[in-house]
Structures are given as structure tokens and as C-alpha cells.
Amino acid sequence: MPDRPIKILLVEDNPGDARLIKETLSEAAADQFEFACAERLDLALEQVAQHEFDVILLDLTLPDSSGLQTFEKMHTQAPGIPTIVVTGMDVEILGTEAVQKGAQDYLIKGQVDTPLLVRSVRYAIERKLLENQLLQSNRLESVGELAGGVAHEFNNLLTTIMGYTQLGIAGLSPEDPVCSDLEVVLRSAERASRLATQLLTFSRQQVSEPKVFDLNQLILNTGKLLRSVIDKDVELVMLLSPDLDLVSADPNQIEQILMNLVVNARDAMPTGGKLVIQSTNVNVDQAQADRWNCPAGKYVSLTVNDNGIGMNEEVKRKVFDPFFTTKETGKGTGLGLSICYGIIKQNGGHIEVDSEVDNGTTFKIFLPCSTQTVSILPQSQERRDMPNGKETILLAEDEPMIRSMCTRVLFDNGYKVLEAANGEEALRLAQNHPAGMIDLLLTDVVMPQMGGIELTSRLGESRPDIKILLTSGYTDEALACSPNGSMPFLQKPFLPSALLSKVREVLDS
């Protein structure tokens, strides 16, 4: 229920009936309700197009519209506003039909008292809220299903892009300008991978991977990528507290939030401006913590401020709502800030926005401090020796580009590789290879003809000592295929260095 007067649009052509309804509601508490009135349907439709209402009281018999079509026209114009139909005794059946088509309730003139009318108004608002929550839940579930459906192919593409980009970097001198360009490509591909994962996190509530880290280090590591996404006429300023406390959160998620806020700030400054990223330590007292619904104590604050076009009050109220966006069609999903909100809350923090039209916007994020030892965050590109070996690996992967990349990486680091495009082909290769001469099966989970799970089962019957490493672009399979850590799993997309490290880890286990 709103914590302000309930705004009611009363659509009634009979002045006596309109006055009676207003007086009946006012008997409960005059300051609880605000009224706007319309005597005709066309005037009422203009009202809902121009103003916000919490509920509509709609007479079905009006000078310009009569019967069920009156409700249908109103419901088409304002489907999100709960509507209570008001009928006369002789048209009670119309009220029932209206409820079947989406009205929250119907009332019969002459049989309405104060408790009934107040209860009907409040229940209508509450039921509509529940309906909207259910609709939102269903939409999120649909997004999750869609994301899961494209995740495999999307992550396959990213695996190829990231893999060959890292190989290209490894073949260049650190001073080569192309090396710097490729590092930006690699970081962008890694961010694309995290965006896909975070979409699943938003829709399926997947578990994050918190680490203790220095937020300043993360901001600086991300700085080059941030500058690559903002326009040249936007000045980027970083004001980072030198004595910043450590935080415990998923660094990939926090980097995604930072990128999202920076992109939004860029879009809010179409003619250029100033973007300020600031970090500082803050103490949250109990009163403030109660308002935020989080513990009192020490927090680290991350502020992203722009001097762009700003937001009005209505946009500020909805800014964290799923699927709400002010961007043009095709330029925003409406998920970005709602994902940010969910991530911050999941990590025990708080996020708020302060904005004014033509005076810019400030997003403030508060993350709980940690007293644990700091984890080392990866730099934009680590240059280290990749682990090698001499064992024989049976590789089953249906995507040719990934299979080619994996074969090259493994072969260049000393391994012998047997390539297969699916499970059946892998079985044939294994049958024609001497027993005991295949050390590891590296297989995708989802493949045509025979998938990785069936392949591991069939191969395990004849080669019980062979070690297994599964890989897939489906996030769910990371959990489903490795219960209690019993079956090693490498999530796509992965870098060549990650592939070699995981292969070496499994072989040495």
C-alpha cells in the first residue's frame, strides 16, 4: 500500500452517486484519499494518460459508453491500474463479466457502506500488486529460460574469441601496441562472459563467489576498459581514498556494476561532461542501517557521479525496477540497474540514487568492510608460463573452432591430442587406441549423437582409470555435473591458461 493518500479516479456521470462515494470514503479518513473525477469515458481516458492513479472506480453506464465495453476500453488504456466496477442492480451480471476480464472487484450501487468500499479499494490495490509481482516473476523466469537457451552457443563464441586473443597476446612483445589493443579485446570478451553469467544470476539466483579485495585496485584494473566505453568529450576523474578498507564481495559482479553505472552515466551526457568515480570509508549508524535493512558498522562507499541530464521523481522511483528503461527500443533491456540492486543486496550492502533534472545523477554503493586477508585480483593480462605436460588427451568437442583452439593449446604445451566431434566418434577413437594410453577425457557436456555424460559412463566401463574433465557453456551444468566436487568441471568460456591449469590439476590429482 502507498504511504501517501490513495489517488482515486472516480468515473461517474451521476453527481449524486459521485458525491455519495466520496463522502462514504471520507467517513473512514478524509486524508487517506485524493479524488479526481470524470463524467465521461473519453475524459477518464485522458486523465489516466496524463496522471498516475492507484485505483479507478468505474461506472459502466456513461454518456459516451455503456456496458462491458466501458471496462474493456479503460482496461486497454490502463491495464496496470486496479479497476473496481460500479454497477446498478439491473446490470449486476456486467460486474461479474468485468471481473472475469480483469476488474479487481464490482460494487452494486445502493449496497455500499464505508467498510465495504474502503476494503474493496485496499484489496484491489493489494491484489494488483500481487498480480504484478507474479507477472514480473514469470517474465524473469522467461528471461532465464531464454538466457539458458542461448548460453551454450554464446559461450562457445566467447571461448574462441578469448582463446585466440590470449594466444595472440602470448606471441607478441609487451611493448607491441597491438598487444595493448588485444588486451582490451580480451577484457571486453571476459566482461561479456560475466554479463551473461550475471543475467542468469539475476533470473535464477545463482551463488556468487565472494573474495576479499581492495576496491581501489579493482577500479584501477578496470580503468582502461572504462575509458574505452566513454566518449572522448567525457572527462573521467578518479578520487580514490588511499586508506580504503577491504571489502568482501564477488569482484566480477562489482566490476559489472561499475561498468553498468559508467555506461549509464555516459548515456546521460550526450554532449559531454564530467564523470567522477570516488571511493571512501564510511560508518553506518544503527538508525541508517535500519532504514537500509542491513547491519550497522564500517562500509566502503563507491560513488559514480555525472553532470548529465538527470532524472525526474517518477524515474527515480522506478530506476531499480526490472525491465524499466528510459532508453530507446533496442538500446536498453531495463535489467542493468535491477541486476546491480540485486547484487549489492546479495552482498549485504546498499545502493541509492540522488538525481535532479539537468543537474546530474549520483549513485552511491555501500559494501561491508572485511578484516580478512586480501585476495589478489587478476590484472588486465597476466604473463606467466602456462603449465605443460606430455600425457595423451582425448578431446570431444562439437564446435570446430573451440576444438581447433584447444588442440593447438594442448599440443603446443606438450600434450598428445586425439580429436573427436561427438561422443560416438570419441568412443571409436578410444577403442582403436591401446589400453592405458589415454590419460584424460576432455569433453563438452552437450554434443550431437552422444553427449559428454553418456560418453564418460561408456568410456569408464572399459577404461576405469581414465581421468575426466567436463566443460560446457550451460551454467546450470557446473552444479549438476559436479556434485560434491566429484567430477571436475571447466565453465565456458575459458582462456587457454585456464584450460591448461585445469587439465594439469586434474591429471595431477
Image (cartoon, grey):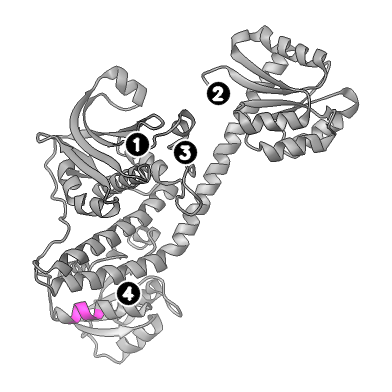
Real-space Cα separation, disc 4 to disc 1, in angstroms:
37 Å
Q: Position of residue 403 (x, y in %)?
A: 31, 79
Q: Is residue 318 visible?
A: yes
How many residues crowd mark 3 within 10 Å: few (<14), some (14–19), many (20+)?
Answer: some
User: Does the CB distance between marks 2 and 4 fall below 8 Å?
Assistant: no
Q: Which residue is mark 2?
A: 1
Q: Which residue is mark 3?
A: 321
Lateral position of residue 160 relative to residue 119, left or right:
left
Q: Which residue is mark 4?
A: 443
Q: Residue at x 30, y 84 (%)?
A: 419
Nearest to viewer (mark 1 / mark 3): 3
Q: Earlier in the sequence, mark 2 or mark 1?
A: 2
Quarter of the view holding residue 475: bottom left
Nearest to viewer (mark 4 / mark 1): 1
Lateral position of residue 380 relative to residue 429, left or right:
left
How many residues crowd mark 2 within 10 Å: few (<14), some (14–19), many (20+)?
Answer: few
Q: Position of residue 36 (x, y in %)?
A: 67, 20
Is residue 438 located in the magenta-colored stretch of the structure?
no
Q: Which residue is mark 1?
A: 345
